[in-house]
């Protein structure tokens, strides 16, 4: 059992990560911009005011840890906007880079001094960031920002190997959450259960792999 930090913990897949990890006895630190009734009801440590695109809020959280160590860091927070060629919006494209690509790198880099020897870092990305898997186009900001996150994940896997820290690049499936307007193939509990299994199986040899929650290795 160890200490797990989850970003975007107040709803959706992040909330499910917190619920299931707490249930199995992990010490969960749930980071969010603002909490929710469902998160408050879990009885985990909730830290509000943490925006993954706001360095100051991350520095405040890191400082609050003192010499406490993190065993698993789950970068789950993300946003989805909908640009098309007909309806282009560069502001939302930049925003998705800020939250989806730079955010997880920022969080991981800020918390690096707190990661324990042998810690695991999970990046919740999307197969929509897979170039090989892009068969339908559009969604410029989301696809580009998740592809960039995948690249950051592989660099982190290389750079953190010396510290015995492994990195999982994870697609949660098509999940019924607010992000998808409750459309999808699976619920958040099934998604999180699979993702937790992937994190459990993560090690230095398979670090940097891009997995579907069901265990399938995805193409870049
Ligand atoms: N659902 C799917 O089918 C699917 C598929 C592929 C990948 N994913 C990925 O899975 C992750 C979780 O998605 P979800 O489906 O659970 O979506 P969701 O229900 O919309 O939840 C998104 C979470 O991210 C948080 N968040 C957004 N911007 C943030 C910021 N700047 N700082 C901190 N937290 C922020 C939200 O907090 P607020 O309440 O404060 O906004 C919320 O907790 C995302 O990275 C998403 O891209 C989801």
Image: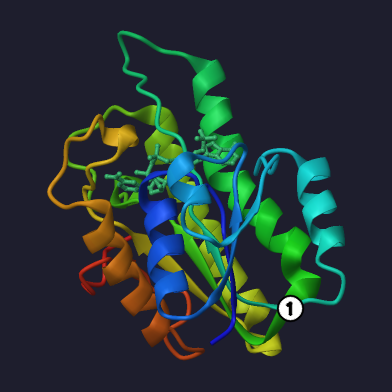
- Expressed as whole percent of the image width and height from the top left, the position of residue 177 reads 29, 40
Looking at the rendered structure, the number of numbered marks drawn on it comes to 1
Q: Quadrant of residue 65?
A: bottom right
| Residue designated by label 1 | 69
Q: Quadrant of residue 216?
A: bottom left
Q: Which residue is nearer to you in this view: 104 or 1? A: 1
Label 1 neighbour load within 10 Å: few <14, some 14-19, many 20+: some
Q: Quadrant of residue 160?
A: bottom right
Residue at x 57% of width, y 28% of height: 95
**Eyeballing the image, is 27 above or below 46?**
below
Q: Ligand 1 appears in which quadrant?
A: top left
Give the quadrant of the C terminus: bottom left
**Eyeballing the image, is 119 above or below 13?**
below
Seen as rendered, the residue at the extreme top is: 86
The answer to whether the residue bearing label 1 lies less than 8 angstroms from the nearest atom of ligand 1 is no
Judge whether residue 82 can be spotted in this image. Answer: yes
Judge whether residue 125 can be spotted in this image. Answer: no
In the structure shown, which secondary structural element does the residue marked by tag 1 occupy? loop
Residue at x 84% of width, y 60% of height: 64
Q: Is residue 55 toward the left or the right of residue 199 in the image? A: right
Residue at x 66% of width, y 40% of height: 51
Q: Is residue 169 toward the left or the right of residue 152 in the image? A: left
Q: Is residue 191 toward the left or the right of residue 40 in the image? A: left
- Expressed as whole percent of the image width and height from the top left, the position of residue 164 reads 64, 89
Q: Which residue is nearer to you in this view: 48 or 141? A: 48
Q: Which residue is nearer to you in this view: 2 or 89? A: 2
- Expressed as whole percent of the image width and height from the top left, the position of residue 157 reads 56, 75
**Eyeballing the image, is 210 above or below 174?**
below
- Expressed as whole percent of the image width and height from the top left, the position of residue 207 reads 47, 80
Seen as rendered, the residue at the extreme left is: 185
Color encoding of the figure: rainbow
């Amino acid at each position: 059992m160890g200490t797990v930090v989850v970003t975007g913990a107040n709803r959706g897949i992040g909330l499910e990560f917190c619920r299931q990890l707490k249930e199995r006895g992990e010490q969960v630190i749930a980071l969010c911009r603002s909490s929710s009734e469902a998160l408050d009801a879990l009885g985990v440590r909730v830290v509000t005011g943490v925006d993954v695109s706001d360095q100051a809020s991350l520095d405040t959280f890191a400082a609050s840890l003192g010499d406490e160590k993190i065993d698993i860091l789950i970068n789950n927070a993300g946003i989805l906007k909908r640009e098309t060629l007909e309806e282009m919006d560069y502001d939302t494209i930049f925003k998705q880079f800020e939250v989806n690509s730079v955010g997880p790198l920022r969080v991981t880099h800020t918390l690096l001094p707190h990661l324990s020897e042998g810690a695991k870092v999970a990046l919740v990305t999307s197969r929509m960031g897979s170039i090989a898997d892009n068969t339908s186009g559009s969604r410029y900001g989301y696809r580009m920002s998740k592809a960039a996150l995948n690249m950051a994940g592989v660099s982190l896997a290389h750079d953190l190997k010396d510290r015995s820290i492994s990195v999982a690049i994870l697609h949660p499936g098509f999940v019924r959450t607010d992000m998808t307007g409750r459309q999808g193939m699976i619920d958040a509990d099934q998604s999180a259960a699979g993702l937790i299994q992937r994190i459990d199986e993560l090690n230095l040899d398979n670090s940097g792999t891009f997995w579907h929650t069901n265990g399938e290795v995805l193409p870049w």
